[in-house]
Structure formats: C-alpha cells, structure tokens
Amino acid sequence: MKLFRILAVWCFILGATAGLQQAQAQPAQTESAVATAQPEVEMADTLRQDGKIYVVVIVLLTVMAGLILYLVTLDRKVGKLEKQMRE
C-alpha cells in the first residue's frame, strides 16, 4: 500500500507541474521581435499534420502503464515476502 501512496504523490506532482507550465506568462513581443522570432518546432508540426503525434502519445502511455503495472506487481511480491519473514 506504500507504493500506492508514492504513486499518488508522483501523479499529483506531475499533474501540478504540467498545469504550471501552461500558466506561465509569456513576455510581451514587439513587432520587430515577432518578425525575427524563430519558427516553431517543425518536427512537432509535421507529426501533428501527419497524425503520427497520436502514435507517439500512445507509445508513451503504453510504456508508462507498463512501468506502473510492473511496480504494482513488484510491490505485491515484496509484500508477500515481508509477510513470510514476519511469520
């Protein structure tokens, strides 16, 4: 059960930091700064246009789900071993 607390705290921290990144203020841009601004990341735009960004997101979610599943099963095994050691 200790793993679930750690996992919950970790998810809360990740969610809080993701929310903070969106709330950051952007510096005011003048017309000359806008004209000389670098273009956005082309790779992300290309992936978004081709629909491949969804593949990237699905792969990342699959890896994260696998890690969480592995940690849960590992926690259960360690819990069983601890219970056997007490007896």
Image: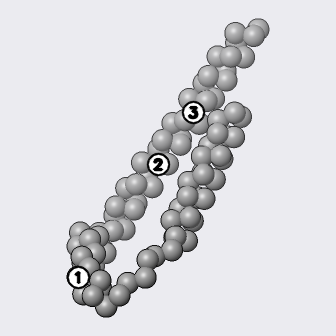
Secondary structure, mark 3, is helix
Q: Which residue in the structure is indicated by mark 2?
A: 64
Left or right of 60: which side holds 33?
Answer: left
Q: Earlier in the sequence, mark 1 or mark 2?
A: 1
Is the residue marked by circle 2 packed among few (<14), some (14-19), or many (20+) residues within 10 Å?
few
User: Tag 3: residue type?
Assistant: Thr
Q: Which residue in the structure is indicated by mark 1?
A: 36
Res 46 visible: no
Is the residue marked by circle 3 packed among few (<14), some (14-19), or many (20+) residues within 10 Å?
few
Is the residue marked by circle 1 packed among few (<14), some (14-19), or many (20+) residues within 10 Å?
few
Place of residue 65 in the rendered image (x, y in percent of width and height, measured from the top left): 49, 48
Q: Residue at x 55, y 35 (%)?
A: 71
Q: Earlier in the sequence, mark 3 or mark 1?
A: 1
- Between 81 and 31, which is closer to the camera in this rendering? 31
Secondary structure, mark 2, is helix
Task: Determine whether 42 is above or below 3 in the image.
Answer: below
Q: Nearer the viewer, mark 1 or mark 2?
A: 1
